[in-house]
Image: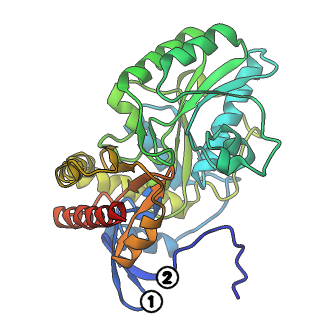
Amino acid sequence: MSHLMHNYARQAVAFTHGEGCQLFDAHGRRYLDGLAGIAVNTLGHNHPRLTAALERQLHRLIHTSNLYQVQEQEALADRLALLSGMDEAFFCNSGCEANEAAIKLARLYGHKKGIENPAIIVMEQAFHGRTLATLSATGNRKVQAGFEPLVPGFVRVPFDDLGAIEQVAANNANVVAVLFEPVQGEGGINICHDEFMRGLRRICDAKGWLFMVDEVQCGIGRTGQWFAHQHAGIKPDVMTLAKGLGSGVPVGACLTAGAATGVFKPGNHGSTFGGNPLACVAALMTLTVLEEDNLLTRAAVLGERIRARFAAQLAGQAGVVDIRGSGLMIGIELDRSCAALVASGLEAGILINVTAEKVIRLLPPLVMSDAEADELVDGVVTLVRRFLAG
């Protein structure tokens, strides 16, 4: 009997090692990784430059705490500022911690403006984490159930609906910020329009709200730009990152610009582990490989290849509602619940995920080859056809 808490419905497999986009279990069986640890393993498994950088750092220094200066953290903040145009960075360990920091920052910003009960606009179908505040900001009743009372101070509107936000702007004087994902991953690979982001930026500027983007899953090159909001040619006031930033080593970040810069003062927020030397080295090497190997362009090109191949093979297939995505965030929506496909994929040697009950979610490593991508598509198509045939 396992002494682990039973809070995960784990698949019946334990992986022992990996190479690139391949994983191997305790019996030596090979699996094609179409999920990348849920958009985490940006460089796949056992990337030689990443493992070498981590090994070097392990022999130097792992952790000292934020009571002291951390050179690697300074270097990572500089690098992210250069790539994003943002001004400051706070480092933590996960996406929910990064979003928690953003929520706290927005509330402090509101209080400094004299707003007693600051509110944040959030979106339906959003997922921002599992802490009490980020859970409350999340637009999924299933993950909230049982944890009431939820944290107040969130106003929920439909995703990608500028009119709904304009209505809130006209009727709620307590709003201080908007928090949203340019691409909703957990919500079903839902992509907002560039015009929505531009319009939202204009509203935030006019109202003095903070424009806050959750790029925990869609950032770090996955959509073909460093950050998904860059497709719209705008810059946020707050951006949160995690998942793919460290290619498997836990690291999160909350970046600020403009009116959000300088809101946090010493003692307002912190993290014991956040931004330790090992995590920052992992992130720095991830960014270096992405840039030097031109993996952002690769993500865009490979994503187009995968979606086109799906479209060709599933054209006219009854039960397939939509094939959508941005870069290497790809969703195949069916007309029925399809959670059973995860286990079927495992049996076939393919790692996939199902989210929003009906959407097959693919988040492969950015180092995936054309041959592996074709194998992934062909394997998933076979699974879908068998499933829909009953």
| Near-viewer residue (45 or 171) | 171
Query: Which quadrant, please, contains the N terminus?
Result: bottom right
Query: Which quadrant, please, contains the C terminus?
Result: bottom left
State the separation of the CA atoms marked 2 and 1: 6 Å
Q: Residue at x 78, y 50 (%)?
A: 147
Q: Badge 2, how many Cα within 10 Å: few under 14, some, many 20+? A: few
| Near-viewer residue (10 or 151) | 10
Secondary element at tag 2: loop
Name the side, left or right, on which 266 lies relative to 360: right
Please give the residue where the numbered disc 2 appears in the rendered image.
14
Secondary element at tag 1: loop
Residue 156, x across and y down, in percent? 64, 28
| Number of the label disc, if any, that sits on residue 26 | 1
Q: Residue at x 25, y 53 (%)?
A: 292
Name the side, left or right, on which 112 lies relative to 62: right
| Number of the label disc, if any, that sits on residue 106 | none
| Near-viewer residue (121 or 244) | 121
| Near-viewer residue (260 or 144) | 144
- For residue 82, say whether it is visible: no
Name the side, left or right, on which 3 lies relative to 43: right
Q: Earlier in the sequence, mark 2 or mark 1?
A: 2
Give the answer, above or below, for where 337 lies relative to 154.
below
The kind of residue on which mark 2 rests is Ala
Give the answer, above or below, for where 365 lies relative to 29.
above
Give yes or no for contact between labels 2 and 1 (Cβ–Cβ under 8 Å): yes
The kind of residue on which mark 1 rests is Ala
- For residue 285, say whether it is visible: yes
Figure quadrant of residue 112: top right
Name the side, left or right, on which 77 lies relative to 261: left
Residue 377, x across and y down, in percent? 24, 61
